[in-house]
């Protein structure tokens, strides 16, 4: 859809630019022919083409009148064609589509380090809603008009791209090259695979989480470039089991950690290259009153649970912390993440 809109806008602009160019060139030629100023010639050409019926502003030679007749035949026809294209824009609703497209482009202009969500099925919708509740900046890609309409009623300020995420131009429009994460949630493993491969080729550093419709395809998706895979059934099954076996833990996660009104949050803070804490032990700098409770250190995909104070941090480590927003910001500032 957006490709067609872009092409139509481009065609109208080209026609309009060509019309203005012909108008200017005709005025220059007429000015030279009659010895008039450019503005006088332009005025005469415009009133001639527009057929308003004004008199000639200066005496026109026979050759000049012959030239004006040619201008009337050529430019009037050209003007009618451009006008018909603009009328088509309005009659077919293309104008509204173009305005909506330009508004979307404006929303996406400054998008950096955002999350792209592909698919607004039940799982995708829940993901988008949760990300919004955490204040994450997201861009949504969906091909179903009804799903988009429902989502926009709830989140009118979230940019939604109506299109096929398998097309590179759609991912380009969603600023995948500048995004931090991509969450793929279509109901087809082959589509998910294609999107993962395409996005990974566009942005080697992006974190990609992909749904697997069939559990046996999770490994294939990881080989295709996904950092994380899941099946909705297994995740919901584990969640239900935990809520039954350990209801307090389940309630804590659902009611506190996932609540936007909670006084504290669970976050992951990465130790970047050149960080002032890289090479230092936790005992040398980590203060839980300042930075929050340190639950684990993630190193090369492995968890160091309740890490001892002698643990030396390395670039690339991620600290899993439970704390207030102020404590998380203190840690981010200290770590230089």
Image (cartoon, rainbow, N blue to C red):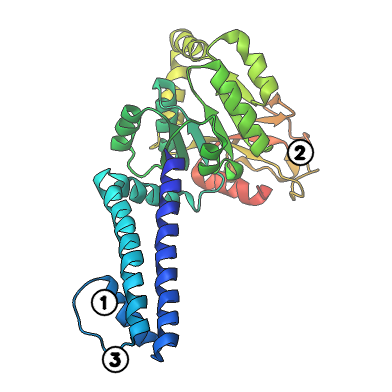
Of tags 3 and 1, which is closer to the observer? 3
Residue 299 percent coordinates (x, y): 73, 30
Estimate the spatial distance between the alpha carbons at disc 2 and disc 1, rounded to whole Å: 78 Å
Q: Which dot marks residue 47? A: 1
Q: Secondary structure at mark 2?
A: loop
Can residue 135 be seen here? The reply is: no
Q: Secondary structure at mark 3?
A: loop
Closer to the chain start, of discs 3 and 2, is: 3
Closer to the chain start, of discs 2 and 1, is: 1
Disc 2 and disc 1 in contact, CB within 8 angstroms: no
Q: Which dot marks residue 313? A: 2
Q: Residue furthest front?
A: 62
Estimate the spatial distance between the alpha carbons at disc 3 and disc 1, rounded to whole Å: 15 Å
Q: Which residue is mark 3?
A: 59
Disc 3 and disc 2 in contact, CB within 8 angstroms: no
Closer to the chain start, of discs 3 and 1, is: 1
Q: Residue furthest right?
A: 279
Near mark 3 (Cα within 10 A), the count class, few <14, some 14-19 or many ≥20, is few
- Above or below, 230 against 289 in this view is above
């Amino acid at each position: 859809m957006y490709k067609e809109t872009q092409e139509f806008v481009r065609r109208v602009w080209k026609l309009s630019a060509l019309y203005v160019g012909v108008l200017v060139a005709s005025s220059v030629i007429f000015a030279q022919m009659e010895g008039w100023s450019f503005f006088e010639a332009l005025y005469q050409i415009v009133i001639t083409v527009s057929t308003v019926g004004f008199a000639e502003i200066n005496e026109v030679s026979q050759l000049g009148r012959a030239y004006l007749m040619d201008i009337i035949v050529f430019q009037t026809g050209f003007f009618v064609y451009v006008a018909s294209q603009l009328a088509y824009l309005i009659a077919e609703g293309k104008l509204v589509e173009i305005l909506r497209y330009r508004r979307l482009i404006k929303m996406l202009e400054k998008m950096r380090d955002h999350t792209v969500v592909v698919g607004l099925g039940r799982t995708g919708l829940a993901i988008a809603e949760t990300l919004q509740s955490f204040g994450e900046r997201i861009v949504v890609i969906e091909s179903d008009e009804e799903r988009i309409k429902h989502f926009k009623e709830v989140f009118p300020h979230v940019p939604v791209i109506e299109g096929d995420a398998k097309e590179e131009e759609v991912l380009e429009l969603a600023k995948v090259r500048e995004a931090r994460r991509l969450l793929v949630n279509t109901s087809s493993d082959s589509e998910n695979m294609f999107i993962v491969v395409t996005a990974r080729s566009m942005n080697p550093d992006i974190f990609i989480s992909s749904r697997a419709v069939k559990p046996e395809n999770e490994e294939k998706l990881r080989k295709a470039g996904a950092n994380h895979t899941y099946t909705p059934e297994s995740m919901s099954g584990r969640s239900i089991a935990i809520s039954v076996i350990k209801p307090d833990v389940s309630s804590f996660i659902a009611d506190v950690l996932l609540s936007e009104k909670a006084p504290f949050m669970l976050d992951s803070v990465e130790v970047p290259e050149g960080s002032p804490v890289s090479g230092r032990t936790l005992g040398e700098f980590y203060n839980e009153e300042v930075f929050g409770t340190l639950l684990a250190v993630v190193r090369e995909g492995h968890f160091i649970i309740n890490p001892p104070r002698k643990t030396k941090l390395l670039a690339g480590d991620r600290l899993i912390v439970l704390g207030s927003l102020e404590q998380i910001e203190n840690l981010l500032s200290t770590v230089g993440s």
